[in-house]
Image (cartoon, rainbow, N blue to C red):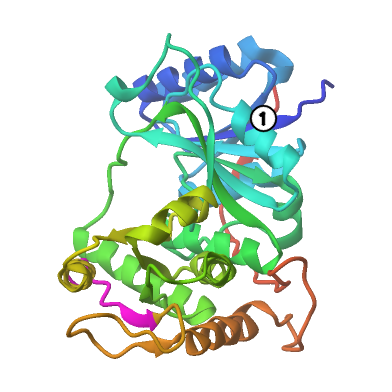
Amino acid sequence: MASFSVDILVPVWNRPVETRNCLVSLVESTQEARLILIDNGSDRETERLLEEFAERLGERALLLRNDVTCGFVPAVNRGLSRAEAPFVVIVRNTTVVAPGWLEPLVELATARSETGLAVPRLVLDAATSRRGRRRPDVTVTEVSHGSFAAMLIRRSLFERMGGFDEELDGDVWCLRDYSRRALAEGYLTFAAEGVPVVCRDEVLLGSPGRRRELVDASAAAVATRWGQAASYLVYFPSTADPEVVRTRFSVLLRAARMGHLLTVAIGCKLRRSVSAAGLGSMHRGIVVEELPRFFAPSALRRIVDRCAAEGNDPVCVAGIDGVDLPGEMPPCRPFAWFENEVGAREEAFYRRGANGNPVTAPADCVTVTIPGGTRKGDERKEVAL
């Protein structure tokens, strides 16, 4: 049997037109990967389509069949359990890829051993894709979670901590939970954005009320496991020592990895140093706002009001000890308080093993094991072609 460096999982439940477009794009753009097609109880038309692709691809395809529809996440977990390549990529059957989309993900995961998950550049509008043009440069940024539209997973990470939690919402909260579990194992989640990957919003099934209940229950479960995410506004005046700022950005990065939202307001003279050091592009959970030379208090108030309007009423933090936010702003917490909060969350949720005892983990991350959840009772039939 041929050996592949990448296995691509494509869970399929009907939608034959979109499925064909997805598979054609994968076959044309990723010739060195094996496709694991999971027929999740599809109708006969889609079933025949998958059989045709699997027969045509030969060793490049593994077709798995579920006699009943068991849900997207259980189908993903089943595909992950059958993967053999060092890197596994999940792709929805409504996603369309282009040549060059996969290489940045594999190159990142190969070069950086701390990469547990990686997502490409995802766009909803096909008109924004750049097929036929010069391949764009790749930008790498940490993100809070991946995407089921297209996402690479290091297989050793799956072997270490299991699959996705099938009791969660099958979307953002399930993805956040998995990235937190990866973080607890010492792995990070990145976006390696180069060639656009075209995806589309999924058609939501079931009643809106039941979906809302599931999302709310999933959000509560994730908050219980990993703590409630918070929003912070951290202020650095123009006179701040750039080296001190750089050191404190490392604390902000630890907070962002755990799901916190950080808005960093800095004086205009300091922005150049922050940009040159790449501090403003470390993590998408960290947003740097440059304050104008004049009327900085008004600009700060607008930032606070905007965060509150988005449902993220921020806690104000003084980036430099003894320097409060200018103007009539809420009182600032000292940075030492913020750093202690970050350390306490790491200790409570990321630095304890299954028996509750402290453990040691690489870098800033640590080891904890949380079961992935497995739905029982599904009757499944498997066919390898």
Question: Is 184 contained in the magenta span?
Answer: no
Q: Position of residue 215 (x, y in %)?
A: 33, 66
**Residue at horizontal 24 percent and vertical 60 percent from the top:** 292
The answer to whether any part of residue 339 appears in the image is yes
Which of the pair 134/221 is nearer the observer? 134
Which of the pair 18/98 is nearer the observer? 98
In the image, the segment drawn in magenta is: 308-317
Q: Position of residue 115 (x, y in %)?
A: 67, 49
Q: Is residue 226 above or below residue 165?
A: below
**Residue at horizontal 41 percent and vertical 60 percent from the top:** 270
The kind of secondary structure element at disc 1 is loop
According to the picture, the residue beneath numbered tag 1 turns out to be: 383
Q: Residues within 10 Å of mark 1 (few under 14, many from 20)?
A: few
- Which residue is situated farthest in the right direction here? 1
Q: Is residue 5 left or right of residue 330?
A: right
Q: Position of residue 141 (x, y in %)?
A: 52, 47
Which of the pair 333/135 is nearer the observer? 333
Three-letter code, disc 1: Val
Question: Is 309 contained in the magenta span?
Answer: yes
Query: Image quadrant for the C terminus?
Result: top right
Q: Position of residue 286 (x, y in %)?
A: 43, 61
Res 243 → quadrant: bottom right
Res 132 → quadrant: top left
**Residue at horizontal 72 percent and vertical 72 percent from the top:** 366
Q: Is residue 142 above or below residue 104?
A: below
Q: Is residue 4 above or below residue 207?
A: above
Query: Image quadrant for the N terminus?
Result: top right
Q: Is residue 36 left or right of residue 50?
A: right
